[in-house]
Image (spheres, helix red, strand yellow):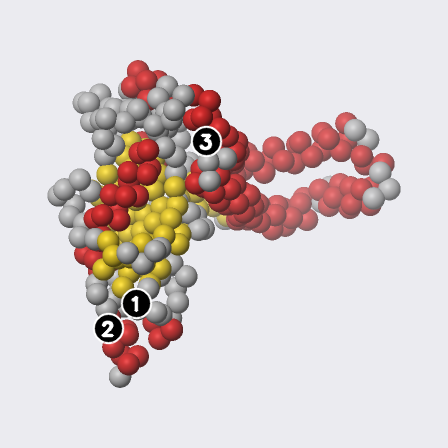
Amino acid sequence: MLDQDRLRKAFHTAEQVRDAFGVAEDGVYREFMAFTDRATGFSIKRPYPPDIPFKPPVKKDGSPDTFAIIRVLYNPANIAAERLDLHKVPIWIGIGKHSKYEYTHFGYNFEDKDCPTKESLARSLSTPQPVTLEFPEDFFFDHSTSQFLDKTGQPMAGLEVLEKVFAQHCDTTRAVGPQIFRRHSRVGFVCGSLTKFLEAALWLCFRKRLDYTRGSLWPDIVLLKAPSLKIFGYKTTKNVILTYASLILVTYTIVSGFGLSKNAFLAPIWKYLTSLWKHPFLALCASLVTLPLLEYGGPQVIRLLANPLKRIQLWSNKHKM
């Protein structure tokens, strides 16, 4: 009976978590999106207030393109209900800047009516940018009282929790002088730049992007719309074909140009590969095996590299390094 009671009390849907927070989409929060996998949770957006140093870019009609996106995960470790402490269920919260246009496009097309204007984008980039924050162990939910708790055990209303998180996010734009602001985000800036580079490589080579809307614990890899080709029945994007061909040409140029084919270790490998490519059927078989490996493995490698950089960026922002 106790296990049944625990299962009944624990939240199982994103809507239950949202209702516990008391979020109404017709207020300051909008665009509720339920998470359908991993831990139960949701994301929701909130516009930035006009009284902070950051000024979001706007579209031609004057409406903002950029919002604060708040991600909430209930019981993020997915602890089984029978072992879950219903008096102190962990709540993971993350908040960051979210551009609607950048989320669905790579780069800006200023002729597009949904794109922020060039002038407002330049003005926005000249203002202090809000810093992405995570609160992994700061808030909990007590099912016995139907209240949220901070890490000291003090009860809080759901909207009060979101307001506190949003306020801290906005406060990251209020630097006391440029030197302090630069120090606040020095490590985060470097890691963020490297992450952007990897995301650009993912888009350019594979026409995919990393999706952090379900929390930054492990981003999804999303395929964007792209022209595709069929090679001997195997369908893939033009970007993957060009990446595959470029890798072959670059490898051949480096090995031949620097005399690496005579290296004691590389010589047998190079001899095997060149003999393989001399036989059209074997070359075709090799391509049909290695091309899918590149298409699947390349984005996975980029995600493995980007994920720790994102974690370091969030940690450094939180600790002001």
* Picture quadrant of residue 85: bottom left
Q: CA distance from mark 2 to mark 1?
A: 14 Å
User: Would you name the residue on which mark 1 appears?
Assistant: 87
Q: Quadrant of the N terminus?
A: bottom left
Percent x, y of residue 23 = 18, 49
x then y, percent, for residue 233: 50, 48
Q: Looking at numbered disc 2 in the image, what kind of residue is underneath it?
A: Arg
Q: Nearer the viewer, mark 2 or mark 1?
A: 1
Point 31% across, 34% down: residue: 170
Q: Is label 2 in a helix, a strand or a loop? A: helix
Q: Nearer the viewer, residue 28 or 105?
A: 28
Q: Is residue 172 above or below residue 57?
A: below
Which numbered marker is on residue 184? Answer: 3
Is residue 193 at all visible to an observer of this figure?
no
In the displayed orientation, state which residue is furthest to the bottom.
1
- CA gap, disc 2 and disc 3: 44 Å
Residue at the spot x=65%, y=36% of the render? 248
The residue most toward the left is 26
- Identified by mark 1, the residue type is His
Name the residue tied to disc 2. 8
Picture coordinates of residue 37 (x, y %)? Answer: 35, 58
For residue 208, above or below residue 129: below
**Res. 201 mark:** none
Could you give the CA–CA distance between mark 1 and mark 3, rounded to whole angstroms? 36 Å
User: Label 1: how many residues lie within 10 Å, few (<14), some (14-19) or many (20+)?
Assistant: some
Select label 2 or label 3 by which is in front. Answer: 3
Determine crowd level at label 2: few under 14, some 14-19, many 20+ residues with C-alpha closer than 10 A.
few
Tag 3 secondary structure? helix
Tags 2 and 3 touching, CB below 8 Å: no
Looking at the image, can residue 61 be seen? yes
Amino acid residing under circle 3: His
Q: Nearer the viewer, residue 274 or 37?
A: 37
